[in-house]
Image (cartoon, helix red, strand yellow):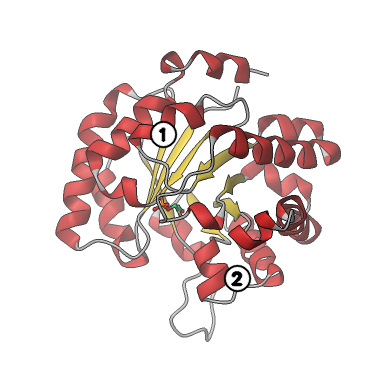
Amino acid sequence: MRKPLIAGNWKMHGSKSQVKALIEGIKQGADGFAEIDILVLPTFVHLAEAKTLLDASAIMLGAQNLYPGTQGAFTGEVAGPMLADLGCDYVLIGHSERRTLFHEDLALIAAKFKAAIEAGLKPILCVGETRDQREHGETVRVISEQIQSVIEAAGIEAFRQAVIAYEPVWAIGTGLTATPEQAQEVHAYIRQLLSQINVDIGKTIRILYGGSMKAENASSLLAMADIDGGLIGGASLDAASFLKICAAAMPMDNSVQKAKVN
Ligand code: 13P
């Protein structure tokens, strides 16, 4: 059974007071959601405060990035063991904003993925095609390259600890969402890609959808057989919207989830 995971990527948003209000709001509403995993990913500077605020709740904490290596002369960077030490469970790797704005290439992303595993963190490997690549029929090639390069560097077994997030670049922050069918097609492809190498990992790995997921479209996306949760940007900054997406991921809310029991 793949437990749904709803993750809020807060990107570069939030003040101390906003983080406090958001976490308190999510905590208040999250009590009934034992059948799903909930994760928040604040900025580095808010992680320690977020950990304290999350306290004994079941909501998990993650970071948006790390630098490979354990320590050293890398001014401004943060290492995996530091995140683990703070109480982080997860870390985003290869988000499209990092690939594009910060020129992270396949080799660096693979090194970051490995570093996350070595630090005991669960990497959420983000993959996705641009609009141009989709229009040129390159979606499968791009996704395959983004995943294969990590498998080559880190080995398939590392994916037992990992989550994959399919985030079509054209749907991020644009209000455009992949249709449930478009997303399902890519999710099924990703699962098949991993299954070809290791059937068990292919069956059990969680594949999240990200890209303008919100309360209004979450149910139809989450109903698809290979969509195991969401990586939410904008809609995760409002506790009520985020909780509505969590509600849409609850198995009882969604009869198709039952079909996800392998
Ligand atoms: P939006 O939900 O704002 O489109 O962002 C998606 C995303 O990039 C999550 O990582």
In this rendering, would 221 be left or right of 156? left
> Judging from the image, what secondary structure is the residue with disc 1 in?
helix
Mark on residue 217? 1
Quarter holding the N terminus is: top right
Please report the residue visible at 52 percent of the width from the left and 86 percent of the height from the top: 73
Cβ at disc 2 under 8 Å from ligand 1: no
Residue 25 percent location from the top left of the image: 19, 40
In 3D space, how far apart are the residues under numbered discs 1 and 2 (Cα atoms)?
Answer: 36 Å
Q: Is mark 1 within 8 Å of ligand 1?
A: no
Label 1 with label 2: CB-CB less than 8 Å: no
SS at mark 2? Answer: loop
Vertical comparison of 14 with 139: above or below: below
Q: Is residue 9 above or below residue 160?
A: below
Amino acid type indicated by mark 1:
Asn
Residue 72 is tagged as: none
Percent from the top left, x then y, of residue 82?
Answer: 46, 65
In the image shown, does 111 or 245 lie closer to the viewer? 245
Look at mark 2 in the image and give the residue it sits on.
Answer: 68
Residue 231: % across, % down: 46, 45
Quadrant of the image occupied by residue 29: top left
Depth order, front residue of 178/240: 178
- Nearer to us: label 1 or label 2: 1
Q: Nearer the viewer, residue 7 or 50?
A: 7
First in sequence, mark 1 or 2: give its number: 2
Q: Amino acid at mark 2?
A: Pro
Q: Residue at x 41, y 16 (%)?
A: 253
Q: From the viewer's perspective, is residue 224 above or below residue 196?
A: above
What residue is drawn where x is 53% and y is 60%?
Answer: 95
Question: What residue is rendered at 19% in x and 42% in y?
Answer: 24
Residue 148: quadrant of the picture: bottom right
With respect to residue 210, does 57 lie above or below?
above
